[in-house]
Image (spheres, helix red, strand yellow):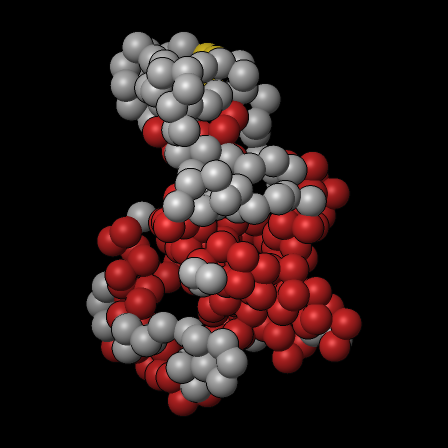
Amino acid sequence: MGAFTAVLICCLTNGVSWQHPGGLVTPQTLQEVRPKLEAQPWARPVWENRKAVLERWASVPIKELREAFPKIRGNVYHNFSCPDCRIRLQFDPFNDAAYTCGACGKTFEPGTDAGIYEPGDRYHGTMYDGWACLFYQDASWTAADLALMGVVEEDAAFLSRSRELLLLFAETLKNLPTDHAGEGDITRILTYHREGDNKILSDLAKAYELVREGMPPETQAVVNTDVIGRMLNDGMLEP
């Protein structure tokens, strides 16, 4: 989701953010989205455009989604770049087999070194490392927006897929050690360092705040422990 769209979606909820536990998105806040969609000329097109993107995420079979979900730590998204044109390759969250440059048309294998960083640099990585970073960011945005739209439109499929994304993050996080090789904000679990992981945690917390009541206690415990708690305690908080 682009920054402009993110800001407009935020405006629909009065610019509030989610916070677990307790939360800052109240039923009243969510109810206010519906009249805004009808009253604000910009709101409905933005909402429908974003919804069209989410439909793809909601409709893909869970087996395919699980297969696409990365099992490794990504690195900085700069690595997902054409080595000749120096622009971002065409990102598709459901295609990690080959990446195409929209400018020159060249296609690259996932293991290709984009040459952005020299070997030995902490940000050095393959194109797949950059793709994985973008996937984690996109999937967390998606989980949050599926939850928001699912609540507002009472869409069971959107809510269900948001919950499934939270559990897929849990599956990956359980098998990834925290990288404490650097100090301070260099700590990382999913991406290049704390900055990248922080946005992902924020979006996953938003999603969980909105969908947790539909989860059985044992599933809530998984998300609490393996996603929210793990990323917060092991990645964000200083000892």
- Residue 140, position as x, y percentages in the image: 49, 54
Taking the image as shown, residue 221 lies to the left or right of residue 21, namely: right
| Residue at the limit of the structure toward the left, as seen here | 41
Residue displayed at 39% across by 29% down: 123
Please state which of residues 146 and 108 is positioned toward the viewer in this rendering. 108
Is 162 rendered above or below residue 128?
Answer: below
Taking the image as shown, residue 160 lies to the left or right of residue 76, namely: right
| Residue at the limit of the structure toward the bottom, as seen here | 28
Taking the image as shown, residue 172 lies to the left or right of residue 113, namely: right
Residue displayed at 59% across by 59% down: 230
Is 34 rendered above or below residue 178?
Answer: below
Please state which of residues 180 and 200 is positioned toward the viewer in this rendering. 180
Is 157 rendered above or below residue 141?
Answer: below
Q: Residue 205, can we see it? A: yes
Q: Residue 79, can we see it? A: no
- Residue 137, position as x, y percentages in the image: 45, 47
- Residue 64, position as x, y percentages in the image: 69, 39
All told, the count of numbered labels is: 0
Residue displayed at 45% across by 33% down: 75
Q: Quadrant of residue 222?
A: bottom right
Residue displayed at 27% across by 14% down: 85
Taking the image as shown, residue 82 lies to the left or right of residue 22, namely: left
